Image: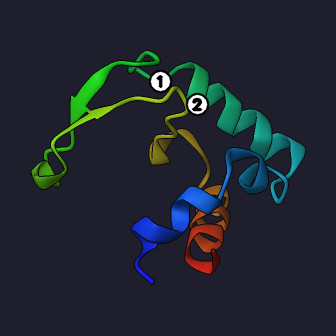
Amino acid sequence: MPTEAKTPYLTRESVLKDLSDEEVASVSTAEATSHLSNGDEYLDLDHLEKGIRRDQGHVLPKKAVHEQTWRKIMGQLKGS
């Protein structure tokens, strides 16, 4: 099953439960300092075929968290 079909079943809460308190704080800070506001529209220039997207308020830039935290989250996405 493609990743796109699996990710709706993976919630923010289920991702955060496997992170340490420090990692959760890092993710929360990254979400709060995102340059997109809840409801902002954007284009993913690497995937223009997806058309205009709308920010849902929980954006996590990779550069905002430690590499180990990012790997944990990616592991959960691959395993869902």
Q: Type of residue at label 2?
A: Ala
Q: Position of residue 69 (x, y in %)?
A: 67, 57
Q: Position of residue 4 (x, y in %)?
A: 41, 66
Tell me the quadrant of the picture where the C terminus can be found: bottom right
> In the image, is 25 to the left or to the right of 9?
right
Few, some or many C-alpha atoms within 10 Å of disc 1 (few <14, some 14-19, many ≥20)?
Answer: some
Residue lying farthest bottom?
A: 1
Vertical placement of residue 17 versus 75, above or below = above
> In the image, is 4 to the left or to the right of 80?
left
> In the image, is 17 to the left or to the right of 26?
right
Q: Nearer the viewer, residue 53 or 30?
A: 53
Tell me the quadrant of the picture where the N terminus can be found: bottom left
Q: Nearer the viewer, residue 9 or 67?
A: 9
**Residue that numbered label 1 is attached to:** 34
Q: Position of residue 78 (x, y in %)?
A: 56, 77
Q: Are marks 2 and 1 in contact (CB under 8 Å)?
A: yes
Q: Nearer the viewer, residue 16 or 62?
A: 16
**Residue that numbered label 2 is attached to:** 30
Q: Residue at x 78, y 41 (%)?
A: 24
Q: Secondary structure at mark 2?
A: helix
Q: Secondary structure at mark 1?
A: loop
